[in-house]
Image: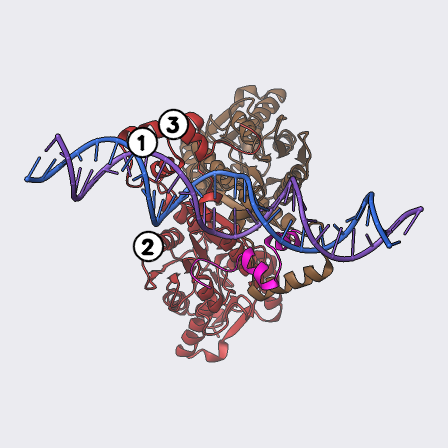
Chain colours: A brown, B red, C blue, D purple
Amino acid sequence: MSKSGGATIEDVAREAGVSRAAVSKVIRNAYGVSPAMRDRVNAAIKMLDYRPSVAARAMRGVSFTLGIELPGISNPFFSKIVAGATRALQHTQYQLIIAPATGDDSDEGVRALGALADRQVDGIIAISPLVTSEWLENLSRKVPVVMLGRHGDAHSYDSVFGDDAEGTRLVMEHLFHLRHRRIVHLTRSEEVTRPGSGNPHAVRLEQYVARMREAGFGDDIRVARTGLTEESARLDTLALLDQEVPTAIFAGNDDLALGALRAIDEFGLTSADVSVVGYDDIDIASHPAVSLTSVNQSGEAMGEQAIRLLLERIGGRVESSSFRVRPELRVRHSTRPVPTSQKS
Amino acid sequence: MSKSGGATIEDVAREAGVSRAAVSKVIRNAYGVSPAMRDRVNAAIKMLDYRPSVAARAMRGVSFTLGIELPGISNPFFSKIVAGATRALQHTQYQLIIAPATGDDSDEGVRALGALADRQVDGIIAISPLVTSEWLENLSRKVPVVMLGRHGDAHSYDSVFGDDAEGTRLVMEHLFHLRHRRIVHLTRSEEVTRPGSGNPHAVRLEQYVARMREAGFGDDIRVARTGLTEESARLDTLALLDQEVPTAIFAGNDDLALGALRAIDEFGLTSADVSVVGYDDIDIASHPAVSLTSVNQSGEAMGEQAIRLLLERIGGRVESSSFRVRPELRVRHSTRPVPTSQKS
DNA sequence: CCGATTTCGTAGATCGGTCTATTTTTTTGT
DNA sequence: ACAAAAAAATAGACCGATCTACGAAATCGG
């Protein structure tokens, strides 16, 4: 019981009076062990409280570790994904580890993904929207990868995503139904919404524009850019309101929507003046004090499916596969009909 | 560029025309390398896009990985801790990995901590309140450990915690000042608040009781138990309100406070009827729609200090050390004076 | 009952680094 | 210019598992 860790496979072998290879077979329950030997080895393992070194195992192939790369863990939607993934791994011998990418630039995502790869994880779930598909293709040549959120088929990695086009359609139809037409879309930087990238925010933006045009509101299309956090959304919404007050704001996600709500409050307005819709339906959205209309897409299901795809790959699947989560609109009090006086 | 990973130190050595040991020296920048050799090796490293295998390194001692064990990542306060820790590790060669413990029983915490230990991390930040100090002492014989949140001095591991006694004092004085005396404390299970355990919730409970007694409200002491989540807090608060409506609820943390607020709303009451105080001051607490009075203790600072202590230990410190964060009360609209009609 | 199979068990190479001990080369002092 | 000292570079053991190849024991079939 020295500082440098516990018993090794060697110790167990000695204790049980067998060879290292025998112990190895037992713990992997491989073929070629007699019941008698299995019992003796298991007894020795229990006695010495032996735990196989993950590092040593990793050197020979498997680490029984799956990694998930997250651009910060502050977004509650990610918590759901992790919760789903963790649950899917219960009672397997795999352990999930999370590598947080500090910022939102592509370098940080790459750094975190690299860190996971360096640690020989057996599979990786990637979320950062800014990591290029080429980079992921490359990574997936070494280790199974599931890209979470991004649309489009990849050759060598799997995908799990929500149907952002459908979700956005639900949002826009809801707003149109409430007679909104001066609808601003509050979204992330151009980098994140690069057309054709397949990123969630890119698809939502495209659909927003398409639906506005289709409804004949092409002239009312307004896209406001902001950062990653609620705070940046608050500031940019304040700037927006200073210029022109729309009847509704469709935010790229709930965090941004919360920032918008904050700004609207600070500006002395309410949901009666400016409706707000979010995306993801994080827990707080349903809180009566907030009551934010949002699009629910089960993060748990996404995490769970991502793990399933990873385990399938580890199990030998070679063709790439994907899973799409169906979104549902949750209508709450943050969206109201356009006051007749304001109808433009 | 095969499936099984990239270049090894051997490849680099061959490319640069030097020995493995030489390359090893360069990447660790150890003593005994001529500038000329350093350049050639670095060139080879860049050319082959070489990255040292963490697993192989771990076998010989260091993994350049620090682990943090979290009882689920849904609590936003934990996000702050992680953010602080991640920031503190910027520009070091260490990488933070998070091991989520699914549930809230002590087994899960132990499992996650064990998973980190198995992966030979160079240091561990532990949060689960249910893991015993003995177990941690034992763990800390193998790897540096920082316990986050729990009070009390440990012999062999370090601690970072908020001053929960002081924080609770601030809360109670604030409530007393608003003329509250029928104050319910909504906290976690007995297991988590075991007297003398030093757990945050245990200290808050103790102080709540002490302050109530001191103020002469001993007869009004009411402790309501609930689970880990906002949802369980909502249900248990509903049950509580069904029996007797207090003038204030002091919740063990903001998540529970949010659940209480939800229940109060569903019960047809408002903050004017029942004041609510939380703890941790998570972001949403300051949102105007929520405006929850809470105790701020910088999670970022806690994460940052935990990392500092870990790096110090790795650097050779042997005496145990600790860091205390000073709490501040943030008064918002969820606490109001007791309506005169209700004064008991 | 004896050769052929099958089952059980082990020896030893291997993964990719680190690090000590040792050798080779360069520098230094006189 | 040459021995001593310092610096540079290397060989090879080592970490703790996995896994192939092979030997020994048990079982089988006729």
Pointer 2 and pointer 3 on the same chain: yes
Q: Which residues are magenta?
A: A1-28
Q: Is residue A227 above or below residue A291?
A: above
- Mark 1 lies on a secondary structure that is helix
Look at 32% across and 56% down and name the residue there. B316
Look at 40% across and 32% down and name the residue there. A239
The three-letter code of the residue at mark 1 reads: Arg
- Mark 2 lies on a secondary structure that is helix
Q: Percent position (x, y) of residue A199? A: 55, 29
Image quarter of the C terminus of chain A? top right
Q: Which residue is label 3 attached to?
A: B16
Q: Which is more toward the observer, C16 or B334?
A: C16
**Label 2 or label 1, whichever comes before in sequence order:** 1
Q: Percent position (x, y) of residue B261? A: 54, 58
Q: Is residue A16 magenta?
A: yes
Q: Which is more toward the observer, B67 or B11?
A: B11
Q: Which residue is label 2 attached to?
A: B312
